[in-house]
Amino acid sequence: MKPIIIFDYDGVIVDSIEIFARTVRVAACKLNQPTGFDPDDLKSIQRMTIEGICDYVEISRDRIPEFLEVLDRELYQAAGEIPLFPNMAQVIRQLSRAGILAIVSATPAPIVNKVLKNHSIKRYFDCVIGGDSPGAKSVKIKSIIEQYDSEPEIACMVGDTISDIEEGNAADVATIAVSWGWHSIDHLLSARPDSVANRPEDLIDLTRQLVKLSRFDVAR
């Protein structure tokens, strides 16, 4: 069985908070519900889900599908502007040699895949499940483990929000909270992650420890 490393996307792999906040403002304005939504608002949302964001900007439930359609279109168009966090491509390349890499994100898979292709790292991911696929992240994590005939004991979830850590815990996999994402590390610690990464390079040693990856050199 191969170990599995599952990443969230926004705030873990890509530094998308500014662009995401901007597209929320644009989508709300196009629904004639202008908002001053900014990155600090994103950081303050306890449950980082699409529903949580819609509640925060006061999008009525019956208009959520319309809002999401506009939001997804704006995000797709902005894909070329979304940067990776420093050294993330190198870390992902190294981790791909030691196990199966997957992404579970609230962002639709076509947007995630477009950004990964733009940065020439899509080939390192065996599976990408976005918000366009129904179900909780914990269910998606379990489905990936089953798909690759692995076990929760050799899988982990890397996330930057409380909901990422909670969903990883619910799926019975090890969890790594990253300090460079949308929620503060103090906030994340309340969800009791197994480990904390303060820079992308830390993921090499932490995943090796948590999911028993074979030793390899990040500098290669």
Image: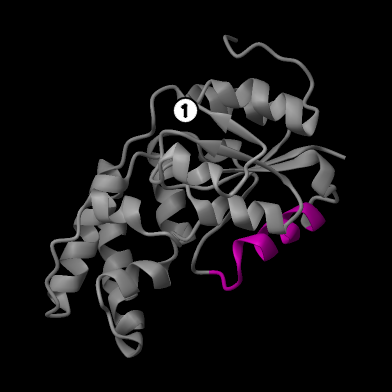
Write the residue at 55% across / 52% down. Answer: 164
Q: Is residue 30 magenta?
A: no
Q: Does residue 98 appear in this view?
A: no
Q: Please give the range of residues in magenta.
A: 133-146
Write the residue at 17% across / 63% down. Answer: 25
Quadrant of residue 86 in the image?
top left
- Answer left or right for 99 relative to 127: right
Quadrant of residue 209 in the image?
top right
Q: Position of residue 73 (x, y in %)?
A: 29, 65
Q: Position of residue 7 (x, y in %)?
A: 57, 44
Q: Secondary structure at mark 1?
A: helix
Please say if 62 is above or below 188: below
User: Badge 1: how crowded within 10 Å, few (<14), some, or many (20+)?
Assistant: some
In the current view of this chain or complex, which residue is farthest to the bottom?
Answer: 62
Number of marks in the rendered image:
1
Tell me the quarter of the image containing the N terminus. top right
Q: How is the image coloured?
A: one colour
Q: Position of residue 145 (x, y in %)?
A: 77, 52
Comparing 11 with 125, the one in front is 11
- Answer left or right for 8 relative to 72: right
Write the residue at 13% across / 72% down. Answer: 29
Please say if 67 is above or below 136: below
**Which residue is identified by label 1?**
88
Q: Position of residue 85 (x, y in %)?
A: 39, 31
Q: Does residue 35 appear in this view?
A: yes
- Answer left or right for 208 relative to 27: right
Tell me the quarter of the image containing the C terminus. top right
Comparing 163 with 190, the one in front is 190
Write the residue at 36% across / 59% down. Answer: 45
| Amino acid type, residue under disc 1 in the picture | Met
Query: Is the magenta region chiefly helix, strand or loop?
Result: helix
